[in-house]
Amino acid sequence: MEAKDRKDRREFLKATAGATALTVTSGLGLPARAQQKTLVFNDSGGASAEAGKLAYGDPFKAETGVEVKITAPAVVSKLKAMVQAKSVEWDVAELVSQEHRLAIREGLIQKLDKGIVNTAGLVPGSFDDYSVVFAYYSTAMGYNREKFADDAKRPKSWAEFWDVQKFPGRRALRNHPVDNLEFALQADGVPKDKIYPIDLDRAFKSLDRIKKHVAVWWKDGAQPAQMLLDGEVDFTSGWHGRFYALAQKGEKRIGCEWTGGMVKASWAGVPVGAPNPAEAMKFIAMMIRPQNSAKYAEGISYISGEPKAFDLLPAQTKEWVVTNPAVMSRMVVANEDWWLDNLATAQQRWNDWIAV
């Protein structure tokens, strides 16, 4: 074989070997990428999802290498359908207020692995065998600061919200019985500690007085803050984290009145049949770590039942957190048990009432 032929053959074999190595290496890489886990956290979306990504999603990936995908909305009926079909998409589910008790009652979430999820430092009532509170929040009264530059002219209670003569303005309330029944009873003079069990007849009689004065019955959580910004309404009920998120971005037109607001809880649990239960437990453990809970609160002002998290907050955020004693003392804690047992009845009565 001539020297030139031998050289050409060596070059051919070198090129072939390189191509083979590349193919083998690439082939090995494909299964590695295919095995990359993604944890799905289903929550309420919006500002909550934005805060959750920074507080939990990004740190969890950095710590474990597991991607976190945040989906929405948090709907227990969809969770039930997935569990029954044995086709669960969520690893961690947000369960809002009484829905977490419904999920437990119907066997939709599994018990926490207390070897991973340490609840020892949490305040009583913020955890059970199946879930933990990662977000205490409220439905409170938002108002337009420009409209009410004179603070004396705005309503500071639900009784004043109901007083359309003394406090004129365009009003909005949620199109739902939850919270509105409690507001209606407060407007009718019922003390905070006497609201439950809810007297439906009295609540709806009180609602009759305000009904025609409500300009908008909102359905989406983003509506109240946007309506205030647009000048569509002057005061409204709303989830206070939406008001806070705008305030943190420098928006000065929205104020929040805590008096008579409803303290609520969002719980985190692992659905039965979750694709990645071990990682899900680790994710929940991260959600109640003081530093992660505080980071979440800085984004949306919702916080867990871990007292140390509150201590880590800047002063301007503490003013917006419902576990702040100065805020909590002015509010009403929602009774999840009453709503679990009576929601269907209250919802049907509401549907009939709002339709007339």
Image (cartoon, rainbow, N blue to C red):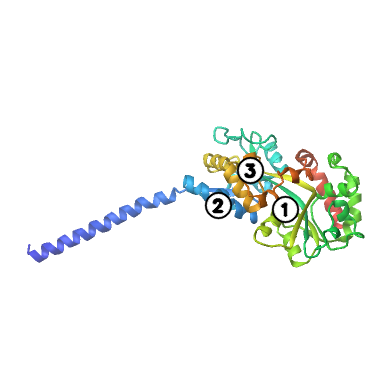
Say which of 237 and 177 sits in front: 237
**Quarter of the image holding residue 269?**
top right
Q: Residue 250 at what x, y percent from top left? A: 66, 62
Q: State the separation of the CA atoms marked 1 and 2.
A: 25 Å
- Residue at 49% across, 48% down: 61
Give the secondary structure at mark 3: helix
User: Residue 103 falls in which quadrant of the image?
Assistant: top right
Q: Which mark is residue 311?
A: 3
Q: Which mark is residue 69?
A: 2
Q: What residue lies at 85% left-to-right and 56% top-to-bottom?
A: 155
Identify the residue shown where x is 68% and y is 46%.
76
Say which residue appears at 70% left-offset and 50% top-offset.
Answer: 319
Q: Nearer the viewer, mark 1 or mark 2?
A: 1
Q: Which residue is mark 1?
A: 240
Outermost left residue: 2
Tell me the CA gap for discs 1 and 3: 20 Å
Q: Nearer the viewer, mark 2 or mark 3?
A: 3
Instruction: Depth check: give the residue in front, 352 or 133.
Output: 133
Residue 352 visible to an observer of this rendering: yes
Q: Residues within 10 Å of mark 3 (few under 14, many from 20)?
A: few
